Image (tube, grey):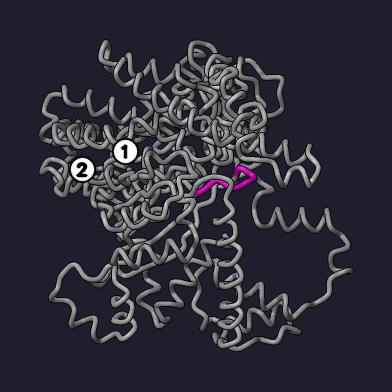
Amino acid sequence: MSRKRTFASNNTKATMNEIQDESAVDPVILINSLSIDDANNGGTGKRRKSKSKVWEDFIPVSSGGKIQSAICKHCGKRLSGRSSGGTSHLGRHLKICPGRPGKTMEGQKNSSSQTNPSVMENWEFDQEKSVEDLTSLIISNLCPFSIVKSTSFMQFVASINPTFNMVSQATIEEKFIAIFYKEKLKLKEKVTNASGGVFLSVGIWGLVFSPTVRCFTVHFIDENWKMNRRIISYRCAGTENDEDHYYISMFPDWQSFCNLGDSDKTKLQIVKDWGIQQNLLGVTSQVPVDNGFISGIEASLSGSKYLLSKFKLLTVPCFVDALDRLFGFETKKIIQETSRSYFCYMTGSSVRKQKYNQIISSMHLKHPSFGSKQWYLTFYLLEVILKFCKAFPDIDITDPLRYNKPTYDQLEAAEAFCKIGRPIYHAIKVICSHHNASNTYFDPLWRLRIVLQESSNKPNIKEVHDVKNMNRDFKKHWDKWYLWLSVAVVLDPRHKIRFVELRFLQAFGTSAKMYISEVRGKICELFTSYSCHTRQKSILARTNSELPREVSDSYSLRDTNQNYNELSGQGKFKELNDYLGGELHLQNHGECFGETFAPANDAAFHGEQVYRQNDDFDILKWWKDNESTYPTLAAIARDVLAIPGSAVPSEAAFDDADERARLFETELSLQTAEALICTQSWIS
């Protein structure tokens, strides 16, 4: 019996009867929708028709006779489809779906023409504006300035606008310098006047040659409650091998750049040049932070920021770097053999290779590059293997073997490796995201902790992973992370202290009291410190507005302190108690941590979608809307939620080097390369 069911891939719709090229259908969508939905409908493919038109763009996936999830026909993303949750979240997804027709360049063009019919009538050519836009394009895409001398580029510009006078490379560089200084001044002012504190991260960007570059990035939440992560400087960290110094002598710019060094003095100068020493709360570094650098900053701290404890900076090891190192530097023999033999098996014939390429094109993981870390290259290939075996279990019947099918033990080894690789991959993705606040870090790291503990009891796991050392290393870092991770979760109105208490009780039993007490103690300590500052600001603001100018100018500090002391004695912790004791903030479908996560047996099919939290909730917007209700807690949230868990840029989360670092190996001067990368970070 032929079942007719509509799918879409790459904005192209097809039916099961019409599909000739299987590469037109995402096998993840195909397998899950057919096997789950059909199994629960007696193989008929029938389901009760939904009243909402939004289902025209989604494939429902049923279990137990009820719709559990919905797969977008345009991009393949899986969302909750439970009837209790409504369909508003599906509608919101369609508005931003990258694969939906109308979101393409052609669709945008047509839409723009229809909504703005008078654009061409009112259009006037502006040479200066065009040059500025061209310069911004070069900066945003890190193009070489010499592109303006390219014949093909000039022909392209002339075909679009013959009246545009192509400018010289020198003019573009001059315009770039003007933009650089303008944007730098704007960012410095924004950093200096930040409503909350500022964090600094120090990452390492490796180059093809021995020298490495330290990347300095500032992290803060501005007055509009928007997360800001901006690169502010680079400094050469020198060479790892002293014998390589004679290579550097051939490059005068590198020699002068290396002379700047990686010293404490240089780092302190960067902090002072950007005026962040008074606002600096902490440092996240990919390498151990120098004591001289930390003590030099702490000596200039004013104590006006209450996240600091006795004028000590919060130093946080880079989470991403620690997670990368969990795998160690060697891959076990069975994993090497599995990768090699399965690759030969999947590509051993034209039919299998076509299927293999189909799986590659449907992967939801970040595609590896030549510079990818070894563990990620291995993890990606093993996920492809598992997906291939699941999608095409009977391929041996239709396609003659050229290579022997790998053993069952090898397939089990692949699954064991990926079982740990998936939560590590997801944790890195979450922590490196430019938009995620620190409240999102706890859950993926906690789930990784659980997986590591569970894997310790698996038979033959030693042949795949050194789980004992992985657990030991993770615990060492977890002990440094968990307190601030927990505080950030408490500041999440969906969870508060109850979620942390539940997790610790489940994991530590009677010993959980120690961890919970430490979290509660830190919250009370922060609230006490911040409330002093918040109330004092409130009193000063009120007295300045209520008293005549001549009286306000002579208003004594003693009187201010007297009023402050009177207020501080009235329900000191009322705001904190109201927040912690209040109702949890619920999503449209009442989701909390763990309820929107893909089932474990789908892990091999959804890559980064595994353990996906609800993306709709904007914690910064919530605190912005509730700042007047919880002023002290909002001040704490502004600082704590900005704590960076990574010194590694998201673009290089799974690579040994960021591709932008290659600019330092081009004909650009090192100062120009630094300015170009920084400016891209500022205007993007």
Asked whether residue 222 is drawn in magenta, I would say: yes
- Is residue 663 on the magenta stretch? no
Residue 286: image location, x then y, percent: 30, 52
Q: Is residue 447 above or below residue 25?
A: above
Q: Residue at x 59, y 60 (%)?
A: 189
Whether residue 682 is visible to the viewer of this picture, yes or no, is yes
**Callout 2 secondary element:** loop
Query: Which span of residues is magenta-colored?
Result: 220-225
Q: Is residue 64 above or below residue 322?
A: above
How many neighbours does mark 1 have within 10 angstroms: few (below 14), some (14-19), or many (20 or more)? Answer: many
Residue drawn at x 17%, y 38% is 406
Q: Are marks 2 and 1 in contact (CB under 8 Å)?
A: yes
Residue 247 shown left or right of residue 13 in the figure: left
Position of residue 639 in the picture relative to residue 376 (left or right): right
Report the Cα–Cα distance between label 2 and label 1: 10 Å
For this rendering, which residue is in front, 431 or 187? 187
Judged left or right of residue 409, residue 668 is right
In the image, what residue occupies the spot 76% across and 84% down? Answer: 163
Nearer to us in this view, 61 or 264: 264
Would you call the spot at circle 2 few (<14 residues within 10 Å), some (14-19), or many (20 or more)? many
Q: Amino acid at mark 2?
A: Phe
Examine the residues drawn in magenta and state their main secondary structure.
Answer: loop
Residue 480: give x, y in percent of width and height. Answer: 29, 36
Q: How many marks?
A: 2
Specify the label residue 424 is tagged with.
Answer: 1
Return the residue at label 2. 327
The part of the image, by quadrant, that contains residue 581 is top right
Residue 9, given in percent of the width and then of the height, sits at: 54, 43
Specify the amino acid type for callout 1: Ile
- Seen from the viewer's position, the closer of residues 391 and 484 is 484
